[in-house]
Amino acid sequence: MNKYSVNLSTVFTEVPFLERFKKAREAGFSNIECQFPYTYTIEEIKKELEQNQLSMDLINLPPGQWEKGDRGLAADPESIEEFRKSVESGIRYANSLGVKKIHCMAGIHPDNNREVFVENLFYAGTAMSEHEITLLIEPINPFDMPGYFLSDLQQAADIIHRVGLPNVKLQFDFYHIERIHGQSLSLYQKYAELVSHVQIADHPGRQQPGTGEINYTDILQYLSKHYRGLIGLEYNPQGRSEESFAWMKGVTT
């Protein structure tokens, strides 16, 4: 399982967050990721990482007030100062926890906020480059997150080119891309040079591979030959979390 990072925000949710680290180690994982670690102190998280001999591969920047509908700050012209503070928090957590990739959510905003998004990404990418951290953006499908600013793969590629920083890259979630565009493997092949992190879940349902219609046999075989990073398991397990890894048996990665 060393080729996978299990997302503790979506897997092992049968137990409280800080107990999921032990669950990940018991299931055989060496690498984890999570969405928003900021409810917990750096010391609390570091303790769990060290005790369970885990590495954290990815976190998100703080998204604003999630409970009030915020889904990121980066494309909001009225939240520039809050966004810059979120970058400081993200870098602080990443440096302390050994994280080298941070996903930046754009938020629920109209497309005419593109310049704000580009400028904020340039600011964040420049700040993170001093710490050798890669900044990621990810198209999210409009069915799960209506109104999300970034919901098209070519749009994401154009923005990455506009920002023009070598550490600003694409997070390619096969579930979201399949829901937005279909043909997720061929699109991965087209945009692979921009990709720095991959996540997987099946469609429909956003559950583990093998529960839906996406051909993960071909996808994982291709990734085994052409992708060298960790594959994030950001899915909602069908059944108990420990039982949701059965699809890995016999898979070449």
Image (cartoon, helix red, strand yellow):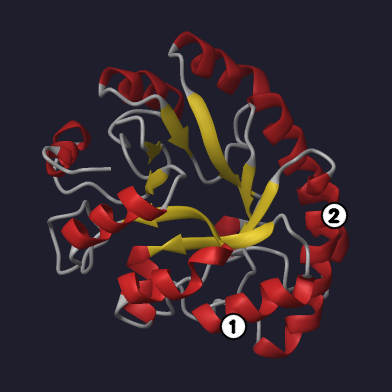
Q: Is residue 228 visible?
A: yes
Number of the label disc, if any, that sits on residue 155 = 1
CA gap, disc 2 and disc 1: 21 Å
Q: Mark 1: which secondary structure? A: helix
What is the quadrant of residue 114 in the picture? bottom right
Residue 65's tag is none
Q: Amino acid at mark 2?
A: Thr
The answer to whether residue 14 is left or right of residue 57 is left
Q: Position of residue 149 (x, y in %)?
A: 60, 78
Quarter holding the N terminus is: top left
Q: Position of residue 166 (x, y in %)?
A: 74, 59
At horizontal 63% and vertical 61% (from top left) the residue drawn is 169
- Looking at the picture, which amino acid does disc 1 mark? Gln
**x, y (%) of residue 144?**
39, 72
Quarter of the figure with residue 203 = bottom left
94 above or below 157? Answer: above
- Quick check: 213 left or right of 115? left
Q: Which mark is residue 126?
A: 2
Residue positioned 65% across, 86% down in the render: 110
Q: Residue furthest front?
A: 225
The 10 Å Cα crowd at callout 1, few under 14, some 14 to 19, many 20 or more, is: few
Q: Is residue 178 visible?
A: no
Cβ–Cβ below 8 Å for labels 2 and 1?
A: no
Residue at 43% x, 30% y: name it: 31
Q: Secondary structure at mark 2?
A: helix
Q: Is residue 81 shown left or right of residue 163?
A: right
**Crowdedness near tag 2: few (<14), some (14–19) or many (≥20) residues, C-alpha within 10 Å:** some
Residue drawn 19% across and 31% down?
242
